[in-house]
Amino acid sequence: MSDSGLRAWLTRPSSMAWSLFALIFFVLGVLFWGGFHTAMHVTDSISFCTSCHSMSPVYEEYKASTHFQNPSGVQAICTDCHVPKDWSSYVVAKVKASRDVWAELRGTIDTPEKFEDKRLELAERVWHELERTDSATCRNCHAFETMQVPAQAKEAQTQHPKAMDGGDTCISCHKGLVHKMPDMGSLAKIAFAALEPTIGQIPADADMVYPLETQGYFVDRDSQTKAGKVLAGAPLDLLAVEGDMARIRLHAWRQDDIARVSYADAGKRILLASLSKEAQAVARDTGAPVVLEDTGQTWTPIEVDGWIATAGLTASSEAIWNYADALYTANCALCHAAPHLNEYAANQWSGQFKAMVDSSNLLKEEGRLVLTYLQLHASDMATSH
């Protein structure tokens, strides 16, 4: 074929030429897809996952778990737990995994000591991803719909129906099944490091504050007349800040004629504050009394204004509740999986927590903060605090 003929064939291809082009591209596409799929399949293998020196410790932990060996003979490998099955999420997970190669080259966890230092960070990364996806990879093998709950262990028979009804996700309770649990104690230290800069620093646009610990407050600005005490974590409306004092308003409920104690909601034993006689005298009813059908008790919504030192307050609900959650998780996950916030009603949390707090390492005020957190975020409470 002459040069002019070749140019004409390329610029004005015949139907046969188009067919040839299509065949070539099809073959190249098949070869590319086959190579890509093969490469992906290789990276899914347990031998590939454990080929890095850094993975040796977790591989040994995995081999000691029931995901590796069990009476049923069904084995779940690394990618079954860590890589989603649907295509888009699968590719995204593979791209994210490339940072593990970079970390391996840098030697960030290439010694047992380095790995332990990073274990909590690595574990939280996986836990958060599983929470985000509603434990999608777990559900590839385990489904509520096909569980035979009566045949399960006693604890599972109790907890799984609650999880089904409450919409809980697997990873909330099932941590440390395959890999060793990290040292959870550092959770609270990390959370407090984020909370600490907010304590005593009240932004100009803040509308609520929370005491980190139980502290006294006063009827007057000059701290001459005691109003009582507000407990750790009690949500307080912020009315003004003058120097080192904040003017606050407590919204609460009192039962029958028991004016000294105030609670977060009618019929719920979420203690927020105690009121002195002087504070009781200036407390205002903000609505009609409510009679609860189940107890016959009469509850009245109230509000009371007062002054409190800013030094022990934070305006960041996120920071203080993150800290309370870290304290809860770090102490209550030592012996068992920490129950979900919505597993119990507010009054139930009081009994559950008080039964276990003596077995924890929580200090008195830490315990008060955690209990307030659990009760304010219980299954029968709105989570707007």
Image (cartoon, rainbow, N blue to C red):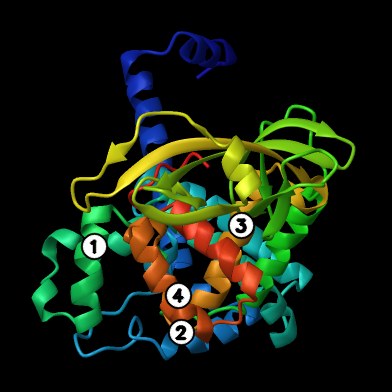
Q: Amino acid at mark 1?
A: Lys
Report the side of 4 relative to 354 (left or right).
right
Please report the residue visible at 34 percent of the width from the left and 55 percent of the height from the top: 136
Q: Position of residue 5 (x, y in %)?
A: 51, 12
Q: Amino acid at mark 4?
A: Lys
Quote the CA–CA distance across marks 4 and 2.
Answer: 16 Å
Which comes sooner in the sequence, label 3 or label 1? 1
**Residue at the spot of label 1:** 162
Q: Amino acid at mark 3?
A: Leu
Q: Position of residue 331 (x, y in %)?
A: 55, 76
Indicate which disc residue 354 carries.
Answer: 4
**Residue at the spot of label 3:** 231
Which comes sooner in the sequence, label 2 or label 3? 3
Disc 3 secondary structure class: loop
Q: Is residue 100 visible in the rendered structure shown here?
A: yes
Quote the CA–CA distance across marks 4 and 3.
Answer: 16 Å
